[in-house]
Amino acid sequence: MAKFTKQNKKVPKNNDLPESQNTQITTSTIFPIIGIGASAGGLEALEQFFKNMPENNGMAFVVIQHLDPNHIGLLPELLQRITSMQVFQVSDRLKVKPNCVYVIPPNKSMSILNGILHLFDPVESRGLRLPVDIFFRSLAEDQHEKSIGIILSGMGSDGSLGLKAIKEKNGMVLVQDPFTAKFDGMPQSATEAVIADIIAPVEELPSKLIASLKLIPSANKEAENEIRNKSNLDKIIILLREQSGHDFSLYKKNTLFRRIERRKSIHQIEKISNYVRFLQENPKETEILFKELLIGVTSFFRDTAVWKTLKENIIPNLLNELPDGYNLRAWVPGCSTGEEAYSLAIVFKEVLEKLKKSKKLSLQIFATDLDQDAIDKARKGFFPKNIESDVSAERIRRFFQPQNEGYHVNTNLREMIVFAPQNVVKDPPFTKLDIITCRNMLIYMEPELQKKLMALFNYSLNPGGIMVLGTAETPGTQNKGFNDADAKLKIYKRSSTIQASELIDFPSSFYRHKTIFPDKMVSPKIVENIQSLADQILLQRFAPASVFVNDQGDILYITGRTGKYLEPAAGKANWNIYAMAREGLRQVLPGAIRNAAKNYDPAILKNVKIEKTEGIQFVDVTVQRIESPDSIKGIVMIVFTDVPTFIEHSVTKSKTGKRNSTGRQKELEIELQRSSEEIQSIREEMQTSHEELKSTNEELQSTNEELQSTNEELTTSKEEMQSLNEELQTVNSELQSKVNEFIRANDDMNNLLNSTEVATLFLDKELNIRRFTDPVSKIIKLRTTDTGRPFTDLVTDLHYPEMDNHARQVIKTLVTIEIATITTDGRWFNVRIMPYRTIDDRIDGLVITFTDITVAKKLELELKAANEALLQTKKID
């Protein structure tokens, strides 16, 4: 039996890999499992990816491609032609092994548990299937920090939620560059959902992935050494604090190291000391690392059991105890892009509707986060269509509006929530709260910081208020201030008993009094520099109160006591000076700020009369624009200087009978002068505004004309598109008809070839198998899955070692070769090798026919033997 080569490429039907694997990434039994999601245009991207992926890479690849549920999947066979790795179509409970590719079958969803793939019937949400999200989420839960997700070309947003889950577990995310993708919907959605570790053209992703994974083992050893020496970690924390203003020193060191290691491997930096230098030289990388540490992963109604309990038990019990007309206050620290806050608002509305006794209750939610970008997204209230996997159809119908391939929250739901950037560690907390949901934030913090936050939450909640933590979080040593509402789901209720607790250092968070905690008072620090001490005393005791505001009037910094001049406005928290200025100051401040913003000359307001509940206060106000950093534009400093109150002389009659009212007269003169200056300033501003409005009106008129012209062009284009669409429909029908004809012709060809019972083998120019008839399998060991393989790789029963050379000779000379040969079992075949000619007379391969001439050959041999016997007899005679 002859064998052309030792290779045997085929698409396996079962996972029969040998136990030993020659891997490049790792020699251990733990290997990376890479999930690859793709949709429209994905086949081309997958071919480019696996074409550039080495064979013995030590990784397993699970391909989640959107497939037609009504057709047999050909993707495994197509990928097998590209890669030398074994390609499997997944069957239920298939164990994943390295150096293999696994393809999801049509009309199935797939998950992974302990390295074993499980198939499920697909679950549709209003016609939307999200197989990539489903698999990526299960991959993150199964592989944790070893999970790797890759998004290639495709339409829609499938995979974005799954990538968030991978990021939460400190996994790696790679995305095809949207500019190089045939369809950029999925790559674009992925880059907007998470910070991708690698964004590159698909042909570059394999090399970048391998380079990153090679550094991880050495990075782990480096991390062990650096844990003993915290110097480099402290330097990174300092760099983060300098650029972002946030201190990560009390975050869990393991979390910090894992995120830093991931960024090191992405940039192929081995030592953490070199990464410190890289951060110093690249502020953009510091910003990316800061975003990575925030771990902004969230979803609607995360942990459904928690929300079910809140809806059915916790919140109804809380509302039943409240009086009619009560306004509840809730706080969602670490809200990320707002899904948790919106979930709480939805559940509250649903509970309120089902109360047996109707009450006019309202809920004000304060949702905060460190990440300004996440807050901006939350404020928009727009979410992609894949939220359908987490939000029921009824809730989407009631609380969302379809908009631009996604959903926008209803106005009444959006108005319940105030989104604001806040550092829960150093900024003052919200108080008098009824509900706090702080889920999966404490797990990233050291016990010391957890203790401070629990004391903060206890202080912020009203007695009987509800606190909801993540499933892996507990109040810890601070549970004395809380009772269990549902210990399993981590829902707690603030106890009604107010106990003296340890003083926790949060700005403006606690009222400190020396007589309450005499043993806990911290002794003042000794200031080594006498100049610094003098500056502090002068600033605190003798400097006038001042405020720094930006060009919008938002307060940036306060020195001294400003309570006599500013007061918080009622309603939503507002740190704008125009809203906080007291009566009297509120009227003159806007004009002074506008005048000061024009140049760097100070604008001085003399004897401004401020009305307070305690009486009248006069103050001089100095407003001056100052030099500001590039990140903040138009900083204005406002300095308040108290002046003695005018003493109105007692009204007495003189000898002439006239009243002495010098003080009052002077006051009125000052007010009149200031009013005259304000009127003049307002007149100038109105004149300028009039000119600007006139110019804007002209621009709008011009724009309106352009829009009208554009509208006419769009109308024409619409008509042309309709006409083109009709033509395309006609062409599509014709193409469908042609396809049907080709299918019938192909069926006729197959039947014709099989009916001749002649073994025929069709090869392309590279001598790869293109087609064969059934009788060929009795001569050469062939299966349907061998299509596309070199025919020289296969085992044959023929004694014809020159077949390969003869085939190449026919390709070269175009001369037919015909030869008779015998098989190992004694069968004779006439082998004819001829060129394959196309309809336009091009040579596009070979046709090899194997004609069974066993009977003729036997007759020939018998005839020859009879002739020889006859000749022998004649000789004897």
Image (cartoon, rainbow, N blue to C red):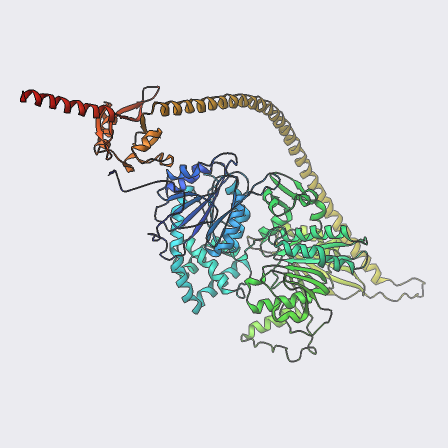
Which quadrant holds residue 751?
top left
Q: Is residue 738 above or below residue 371?
A: above
Which quadrant holds residue 87?
top left
Quadrant holding the N terminus: top left
Left or right of residue 833: residue 756:
right
Residue 95 can be seen in this image: yes
Q: Return the x and y of residue 547 as percentages of the image width and height.
A: 66, 60
Residue at the front extreme? 877
Quadrant holding the C terminus: top left
Q: Return the x and y of residue 267 as percentages of the image width and height.
A: 41, 53
Which quadrant holds residue 180?
top left
Left or right of residue 759: residue 293:
right
Kindly identify the residue that appears in the image at 94 percent across and 66 percent down: 655
Residue at the bottom extreme? 519
Q: Return the x and y of residue 588 as percentages of the image width and height.
A: 74, 54
Front-most of residues 31 and 476 = 31
Kindly identify the residue that appears in the image at 43 percent across and 60 percent down: 276
Left or right of residue 861: residue 245:
right
